[in-house]
C-alpha cells in the first residue's frame, strides 16, 4: 500500500494466486492493513477473474462486489467504510516472482502515474531491471 491513499494513480497492489475472486478477495480482506479501513464494497475487472458472485461471504456477513461497466483490466476498487476508494493493481497470478514483486513495488511507490495496464506492460517489457531503480520517485524516474 502507498503511504497515503488517493495521492497517486494507484494506492497499492495485490497479487492473487488464482482467478477465483471469492476465495482471493476473502484472503485479501484478512491481509489488509488496519489503517486502510474496513472494506465494504469491491469493483473488479471481469477479464481478471473467473465468473464471480455478486456478494462474497466474509466473516459473519457479506461483501458486495460488482464489475466495471467497461473493461478496466488489472484494477480493483475497494471502498472503505469512511468512503475512501482504494485503487489496487491486480497482478496476474501467472506472473513470476520477480515480475510480481516489481509490479507490487511500483503500485505502492509514491508518485506512480501509470494505469494498472501500463504498469504491467512496463514490468513485462523490462524483465531484468531492478525495481528500486525504475520505480523510485527521486526526480521523475
Image (tube, rainbow, N blue to C red):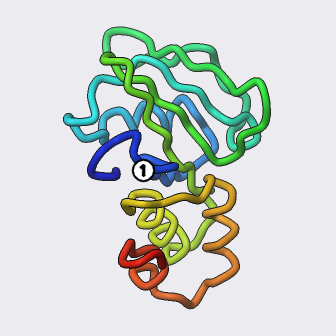
Task: Please give left or right for residue 51 compared with residue 7 in the image.
Answer: right
Q: Quadrant of residue 68?
A: top right
Q: Residue at x 79, y 31 (%)?
A: 70
Please rate how many residues cluster around mark 1, counting C-alpha atoms within 10 Å: few if below 14, some from 14 to 19, many from 20: many
- Residue 31 position within the rendered picture, expressed as x and y whole percent measured from the top left: 30, 41
Q: Residue at x 49, y 44 (%)?
A: 88
- Above or below, 106 against 12 in this view is below
- Above or below, 97 against 16 in this view is below
- Residue 21 position within the rendered picture, expressed as x and y whole percent measured from the top left: 58, 34
Q: Quadrant of residue 113?
A: bottom right
The single residue placed furthest to the bottom in the displayed view is 128
In the image shown, does 28 or 68 lie closer to the viewer?
A: 68
- The residue at which mark 1 appears reads as 12
Q: Residue at x 46, y 52 (%)?
A: 13
Q: Residue at x 45, y 79 (%)?
A: 131
The single residue placed furthest to the top in the displayed view is 61
Amino acid at each position: 500500500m502507498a503511504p497515503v491513499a488517493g495521492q497517486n494513480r494507484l494506492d497499492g497492489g495485490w497479487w492473487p494466486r488464482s482467478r477465483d475472486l471469492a476465495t482471493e478477495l476473502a484472503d485479501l480482506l484478512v491481509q489488509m492493513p488496519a489503517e486502510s479501513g474496513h472494506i465494504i464494497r469491491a469493483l473488479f475487472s471481469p477479464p481478471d477473474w473467473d465468473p464471480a458472485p455478486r456478494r462474497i461471504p466474509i466473516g459473519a456477513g457479506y461483501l458486495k462486489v460488482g464489475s466495471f461497466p467497461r473493461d478496466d483490466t488489472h484494477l480493483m476498487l475497494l471502498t472503505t467504510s469512511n468512503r475512501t476508494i482504494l485503487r489496487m493493481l491486480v497482478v496476474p497470478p501467472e506472473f513470476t516472482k520477480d515480475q510480481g514483486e516489481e509490479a507490487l513495488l511500483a503500485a505502492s511507490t509514491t508518485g506512480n502515474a501509470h494505469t494498472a495496464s501500463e504498469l504491467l506492460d512496463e514490468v513485462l517489457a523490462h524483465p531484468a531491471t531492478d525495481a528500486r531503480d525504475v520505480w523510485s520517485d527521486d526526480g521523475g524516474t
